[in-house]
Amino acid sequence: MLREDYVRYAAAVHIDGARFLRDTVAAMLPCYAMNACKSAFGAASLLSRCEAVMDKAIGLSVGLMEKNGLTKYTAVIEARMRLMGTELSGALTQKQINAARASVVPPGTRGDVYDGFVSLSSEAEKAAAECVAAIDESVAAMREGRAAFAVPVTVLLFLKRLCADYSALCRKLAAGERAEFLKRQDEFDKCLRALCYAAATEGVEASSSADALAALSSSGLIPSLPPVLFDILLRYEDLPVAGAD
């Protein structure tokens, strides 16, 4: 594959994937119980690493982004996550907006961008694998009755698949191969239904729309769930569907 094509595929995968990964960890962090301090500290460390992956992905994607990878709720939802005690970098979001505005790769940097994406893909693959392991640990604790968790199991399994898909794409990119983030429609539908039911328990009218749920959460009307879950769902909805022509 030509390097010109590779860097565009890599930018698209990492702009979506790195933020999905960071937000997945962010969604889990405020949900750990007091008896899960070790897991919580591990998640906090992983969150920092994921933001470093995001930072590198944004820096490498200047002039290569066909979309900015954000929603109209992202900034507000990040602010609401800070109210839950999970600090998310607003500077990274602004950096991503600025990077999306650039129309060309800075002169003389294309070779560095290619090598950077290869290196970043190896780093991101490891972080995604750690996130999958953390989700497995939480799901097992819930099913065995050892822990309660605010995020429903169905949603955790969706996040696990999302991170596993990103990890698999990173392996391809690290090998210099083409990769593309695709939506698993059945997984999306199951997660959407689960979040609709969770919203209904908050006394708000259940909605079948990811956009409506994100609007409710960004307004503070679904307080028992991390708002970033709904931003993840809305961004995932915008991906091309796997198997579509």
Image (cartoon, grey):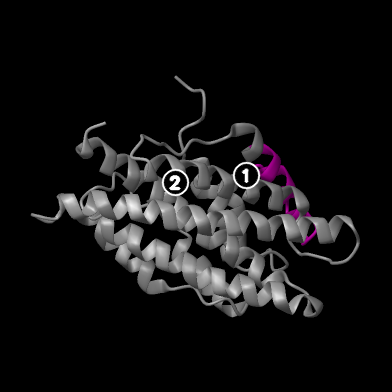
Residue lying furthest front: 175
- Under mark 2, the amino acid is Cys
Question: What residue is pinned by disc 2?
Answer: 170
Nearest-to-viewer mark from 1 and 2: 2
Mark 2 residue element: helix
- Under mark 1, the amino acid is Arg
Q: Residue at x 20, y 38 (%)?
A: 4
Dot label at residue 84 = none
Q: Residue at x 32, y 48 (%)?
A: 11
Give x and y (percent) for residue 160: 64, 49
The reply to whether residue 71 is visible in this rendering is: no
Mark 1 residue element: helix
Where 99 falls versus 118 (above or below)?
A: below
Question: What residue is pinned by disc 1?
Answer: 161
Instruction: Indicate which disc, 1 or 2, sits on the residue closer to the N terminus.
Output: 1
Where 202 falls versus 153 (above or below)?
A: below
Q: Looking at the rendering, in which quadrant would you find the N terminus?
A: top left
Q: Which residues are magenta?
A: 189-209
Question: What's the distance in space between the residues labelled 1 and 2, CA to CA?
Answer: 14 Å
